Image: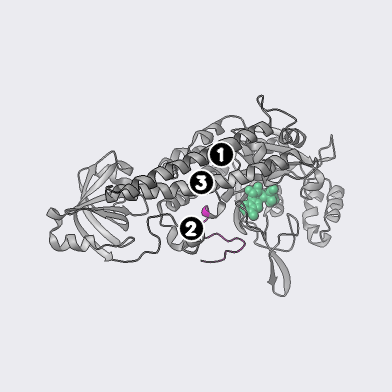
Amino acid sequence: MKTYIKDLSTHKDSVVTLQGWVQNKRESKALIFIILRDGSGFCQCIADLAVLGDIKFAEASKLGQESSISITGKVVEDTRQIGGFEIHVQSIDIVQNCADYPIANKEHGIEFLMDQRHLWLRSKRQWAIMRVRNTVIFSIHKFFQKEGFVQMDAPIFTGNAAEGTTDLFETDFYGQPAYLSQSGQLYGEAMAMAMGKIYTFGPTFRSEKSKTRRHLSEFWMIEPEMAFHDIYDNMDCIEDFVRYVVKEVLENCKVELELLERDTTILEKTVEPFIRLTYDNAVAIIKGEQEVEGQTTIAVLEQDLADTKANIASLKADIAEREEKIAAGGMKKGQVNFNLNTIDKNKNQIKQLEEDERNIPQWLDSAKNFTYGEDFGGSDETVLTRMFDVPVMVYDWPHEVKAFYLKRNPENPRFARGVDMLAPEGYGEVVGGGERETNEQMLIEKINEHKLPMEVFEWYLDLRRFGSVPHAGFGLGLERLIAWICKLPHVRETIPFPRMYGRLNP
Ligand code: 4AD
Ligand code: MG
């Protein structure tokens, strides 16, 4: 039977064979320390000259980063190691010794890493993110299955737009134009009338010719649709769902979150009720006209700016101090490397902080000048969510800025019963959804107003003609949720092979 690193605790003091890759290696005269990665985890393996003998020891010392090997040795408890165990090597079988692995154990530029995505996936950080992604996906299915939803697959080739016509990818379907799906919702609505509660989980395509940290051209969306549910039931479902997924990640991805240096305080807060605000309320907060716990957005942002500047200054001072120490000489090689690495890390952090330093004044500006009636932009969402440490759900939007299928609030038809869930820490919209229009005439008007071709919506209108019921649903962007859970600066790292404006390979 094969042994995996994740199971070492059940093999304490016995001899096992592990198969994997050399993640990292350092050595002294008589010892080689190999960090082995086998996919299930990482483990330090110590090869001793006295045990291996001259020839085998020399072979092992030539192993390049990412060489593939089989290691046999004794499992020894060492609580200082990740995973809590290390291997005292008895023998090493080399599967392939490789040299010049393109990604060194130092900081690289993002474009270089994206070009090397097929290899970059092997790094500890990407390993952690992909495992969080796996847990998120599994827990999404667990949630909906336990709640009695039926999973459905919506088509990818579609004859109609669901979310507006500006970002459609057009393809040729046997000589007829077709679009790659930008949402499975309309089909989900049909299926919900057959099954009661359904969810889709599929790839979604949107052509957006801009580079932002939250847009992909191909992303995965989860879209539940529920018969006999209104906007408030919908918000309950969003809240239960997001809370469940976050809890599953906290319980099952401790090692991964630690590797990502994710402070989990905010994630743990999701057990508390989420904030629910009408659009009107949210706008008043964004513009600084309404306080949250005694503070306005304007005051909070000004404080953020001051803190950011102070952080940059202290990181710069730390770099200068380390550089001076290195220049003074007399430091051991290991210590020099450690300091150089810390300097690289600090420089990267400064880059991010400097971006904030540039952005915050713009956020301040757009918050003060927000025009009532408009949709929220990324900066408005950042400003609003900055005020809370749990997710915020904004509902009842001016109907003009939202999709054609949303129901009007019967008490105030200026508003459509849409709801967006915005994640904290500046992440913004992760979920968009709402209660659906059931009135056939209203829908026809909206389809005309949006200048959509009526013929392709005939089947959709049938849903209002035969056994129409109140219903609601939402779409959750998988990559945006993962970016927030892992606190990543960009969604591009949350999907194995990102597709976005300017990036089709590898
Ligand atoms: O808000 P959106 O456009 O809503 C819909 O598509 C509805 N049909 C959903 C429904 O009610 N069934 O998209 C839903 C979510 C967004 O909140 C966001 O998280 C994600 O999909 N999303 C994107 N994620 C990555 N890259 C993009 N370009 C995205 N566009 C939307
Ligand atoms: Mg949206």
Q: Are marks 1 and 3 in contact (CB under 8 Å)?
A: no
Residue range of the region highlighted in magenta in the rendering:
493-506
Residue 233 position by quadrant: top right
Q: Residues within 10 Å of mark 1 (few under 14, many from 20)?
A: many
Q: Are marks 3 and 2 in contact (CB under 8 Å)?
A: no
**For the residue marked with disc 3, what is the amino acid?**
Ile
Residue for badge 2: 109
Q: Is residue 32 above or below residue 387?
A: below
Q: Which mark is residue 7?
A: none
Q: Where does residue 433 sit, x and y in percent of width and height?
A: 70, 45
Identify which residue, 236 or 133, lies in the foreground.
133
Closer to the chain start, of discs 1 and 2, is 2
Q: Based on the picture, tell me whether residue 60 belongs to the magenta stretch.
A: no
Q: Which of labels 1 and 2 is toward the front?
A: 1
Residue for badge 3: 350
Total marks shown come to: 3
Q: Where does residue 162 sit, x and y in percent of width and height?
A: 73, 55
Q: Is residue 206 above or below residue 272?
A: below
- Whether residue 158 is visible here, answered yes or no, is yes
Q: Where does residue 354 sit, x and y in percent of width and height?
A: 56, 46
Asked if the beta carbon under badge 2 is closer than 8 A to the nearest atom of ligand 1, the reply is no
- Whether residue 429 is visible here, answered yes or no, is no
Q: Are marks 1 and 2 in contact (CB under 8 Å)?
A: no
What kind of element bears circle 1?
helix
Q: CA distance from mark 1 to mark 2?
A: 23 Å
Identify which residue, 403 or 228, lies in the foreground.
403
**For the residue marked with disc 2, what is the amino acid?**
Gly
